[in-house]
Amino acid sequence: MVIVGLFSWWYGAGWERCIAVVKQGLLAVYDYFSLDLLLRTLFSPFRQISAGSVRGPLGVQLRAFVDNIISRTIGAAIRTVVLAIGILTLSLVAIVGLLRIALWPFVPVLPLVFLSFVVAGWVPWTI
C-alpha cells in the first residue's frame, strides 16, 4: 500500500508541486530583475543629480540638457545590460524547469535502470 500511495502522490500531487515550484522560480527571477520596470524606465535618467526644469542663461540650460542626455544614455546602457542578463537568466531557469518537469515521471524508475546497468557490467567511461 505504501508503494501505491507513493506512486499516486508522485504522479499526482508531487508532479503538480514540481510544476508550482518551477513556476514560482520563474516568477522570482522575473521579480528579482524587475524586467517590466526596466522596460518602462529604459530611457529614464540614471541617478540624475538635479531633476526638473532649469532657468537661467542659455549656457546653463544647454549644460543641463547635455547632462540630461548623458544621464539618459548611461541609464539606457546599464538597463539594457541588466535586461539582457535578466532575460538570459530567465531563459536558463525556464529550460532547467522544463527539464525538471519532463524528467519528473522517470525518477522513480531510475534506480531500476541503474541496477540493470550494474548487473550488465556497463560503466559510463573507461579509464
Image: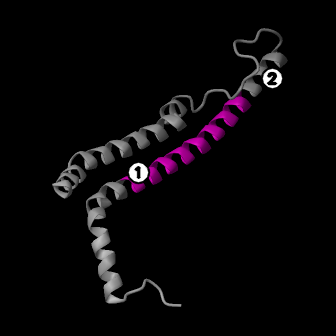
Answer few, some or many: residues within 10 Å of disc 1's Cα (few below 14, many 20 plus, some between 14 and 19).
some
Residue ID at (37%, 87%): 122
Find out whether residue 84 is within the magenta segment. yes
Of all residues, the one furthest to the top in this rendering is 55
Which residue occupies the foreground of this view, 39 or 127? 127
Q: Quadrant of residue 21?
A: top left
Residue ID at (80%, 23%): 63
Between circles 2 and 1, the one closer to the viewer is 1
Q: Amino acid at mark 2?
A: Arg
Answer few, some or many: residues within 10 Å of disc 2's Cα (few below 14, many 20 plus, some between 14 and 19).
few
Q: Secondary structure at mark 1?
A: helix
According to the image, label 1 marks what residue?
A: 94
Residue ID at (71%, 26%): 47
The picture places residue 26, in percent across and down from the top left corner, at 42, 43
Which label belongs to residue 63?
2
* Segment colored magenta: 69-97
On screen, residue 4 above or below 62: below
The picture places residue 16, in percent across and down from the top left corner, at 26, 45
The picture places residue 100, in percent across and down from the top left corner, at 36, 56
Of all residues, the one furthest to the front in this rendering is 1
Q: Amino acid at mark 1?
A: Ala
On screen, residue 109 above or below 29: below
Q: Which secondary structure dominates the residues rendered in magenta?
A: helix
Residue ID at (40%, 51%): 94
Which residue occupies the foreground of this view, 82 or 52? 82
Q: Is residue 75 left or right of residue 100?
A: right
